[in-house]
Image (spheres, rainbow, N blue to C red):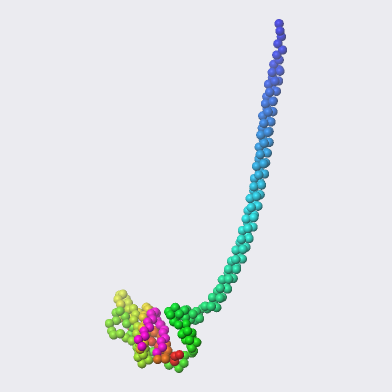
Amino acid sequence: MRISSYNPQDRYRQRSSERMTGFLVVFCVLGLAFGMGFWLGNQNAGQQERMLKKRVEKLLNEQEAMQDSVTELRVEAQTALSRYDQLQETYKEVLPEGPMQELVALVKQQLDEGRSAERLTFLIRSARPPRNCSEPETKRFVVVTPAYDGPGSQISIAEGALIVKASGGSAIDAQGRPEAWYDPSKKIKVEFLGNEGTKKVKTGNMPLRHSIIVDNREYRLTVAEGARSFAKVTFDSCDYP
């Protein structure tokens, strides 16, 4: 009869050894995976850090370039302001404000209308203070309106050598109806008629000023509001030229 050498303790020890081996294998795999992950993470972090450093360096360079541009723009702005101030001064010297500006504009208008530059130069050079002037006089006349049915009204100056007359808009009553007399707050049209057939028309609000040459005398006239229906003309005359 043969006796078996099988020992249950050996089987238990073998199973225990296999489980321990399995645990070790799993532990080694997990450790290897953790180490690999840590290494990859470290590599990725290093790469990210290098990229961030490059980005920061690029941004710093861009910031420095922008600061240089801002500095240049400020310098250019200051230069432009300085040039603008110089142009303003030059403009004021060439075309100052006040009467000089009005005279320059008047000369330009005369030239644009075909006046001779030589004639304008002669007149400007021959200009001098008024001489042998008469005492101011005042005359009045009725201003013609659309609602006025009477005869035309006018005044004569310089023994009839100059005629002045005017027309204007009618005044309005409380019911909105036009009156026979003119409204002095509205523009009027004044006609200056010379004995040689010359005619000058001026339109605007009173007072209106005008000067005209008649028989070597310069007549200076001001048309202003008078009593109701009337305009008054104040004038004097001086030698010309």
Q: Position of residue 210 (x, y in %)?
A: 41, 84
Of residues 132 and 5, the one drawn nearer to the viewer in this rendering: 132
Horizontal side of residue 180 vs 218, given as left or right: left
Rendered-image quadrant of the N terminus: top right
Residue 240 in the figure: left or right of residue 167: right
Is 80 above or below relative to 171? above
Comparing 82 with 189, the one in front is 82
Task: Report the front residue among 241 and 51.
Answer: 241
Q: Quadrant of residue 91?
A: bottom right
**Is residue 241 shown above or below 204?**
below
Let me know if residue 150 appears in the view. yes
Toward the bottom, the furthest residue is: 132
Which residue is depicted at the point 45% across and 90% down?
241
Kindly identify the residue that appears in the image at 35 percent across and 89 percent down: 195
Give the prevailing secondary structure in the magenta stretch.
strand
Q: Is residue 231 left or right of residue 72?
A: left
Residue 169 included in the magenta stretch of the image: no
Magenta segment range?
A: 196-214
Residue 20 location in percent, x, y? 69, 25
Which residue lies at the image location 40% right of the left edge and 82% below the top edge? 208
> Tag count in the figure?
0
**In which quarter of the view is residue 179 placed?**
bottom left
**Residue 190 percent coordinates (x, y):** 36, 82
User: Which residue is at 41% across, 88% downward?
Assistant: 213
Farthest top residue? 1
The part of the image, by quadrant, that contains residue 219 is bottom left
Does residue 227 show up?
no
